[in-house]
Amino acid sequence: NAGVTQTPKFQVLKTGQSMTLQCAQDMNHEYMSWYRQDPGMGLRLIHYSVGAGITDQGEVPNGYNVSRSTTEDFPLRLLSAAPSQTSVYFCASRTDSYNEQFFGPGTRLTVL
Amino acid sequence: KNEVEQSPQNLTAQEGEFITINCSYSVGISALHWLQQHPGGGIVSLFMLSSGKKKHGRLIATINIQEKHSSLHITASHPRDSAVYICAVDGWSGGGADGLTFGKGTHLIIQP
């Protein structure tokens, strides 16, 4: 199993550009989440999904969209990038809320 | 919203020392996770526990539900244990909400 994969590993955007961070898992997990990690803030939940076709907002959803058309994929879209979205983004998955989470390797995003 | 506090924020110790990292939270939980993140690296789940104690190699995690407190211990510490250790809690999701609430992490350095 590849586990949780994320692409790209690094990305630099200009303010106003849009892009999609990809996340995929091959463990048939129903639950998938996106987090951002900022210095001094810890990890914060952006959006999550409890199954294909079901998504909901987390703590910091503004400026991001998600969709879940398949169990495997959970892309995160930045609609119009802002410098405040400079961060490291982690995707994670698990079978349900009673089991451990598996994290992807992260995407380091810089918005100029 | 659950408040998760970790202590200490930073810890430097000598190889071989016994290490303790603490985590306290404000609201009852269904489970607590200990995670490890090496510099520039991904996040790995070490333990998930809802009661008592778990041991894996030189790592021991304990939780006291009544006191809303958990500890992570490392015995015979080694420089390869140098990492950020993150405590995270699962709330009582009820309606199926997912996503952990994270502490800000403890930065551990083990010197040879």
Image (tube, rainbow, N blue to C red):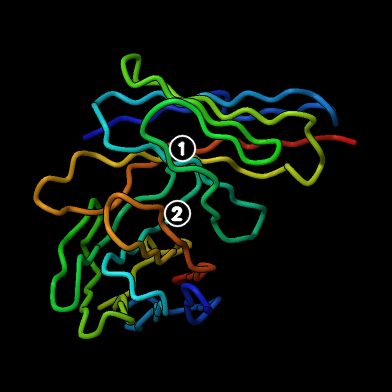
Q: Is residue A59 above or below residue A72?
A: above
Q: Residue B12 placed where, x, y %?
A: 75, 28
State the residue at coordinates (50%, 41%): B34
Q: Do callouts 1 and 2 point to residues on the same chain?
A: no
Letter of the chain that mark 1 sits on in the rendering? B
* Real-space Cα separation, disc 1 to disc 2, in angstroms: 14 Å
Crowd tier of the residue under label 1, counting other residues whose Cα lies within 10 Å: few below 14, some 14–19, many 20 or above: many
**How many numbered tags mark residues here?**
2
Q: From the top left corner, tell me how far across and down residue A108 is, in percent.
A: 52, 68
Determine the residue positioned at 78% across, 26% down: B13
| Mark 1: secondary structure | strand
Q: Which residue is mark 1?
A: B87
Residue type highlighted by circle 1: Cys
Whole-percent x, y for residue A79 in the image: 25, 78
Q: Which residue is mark 2?
A: A37
Picture quadrant where residue B64 is located = top left
- What's the residue type where badge 2 is placed? Gln
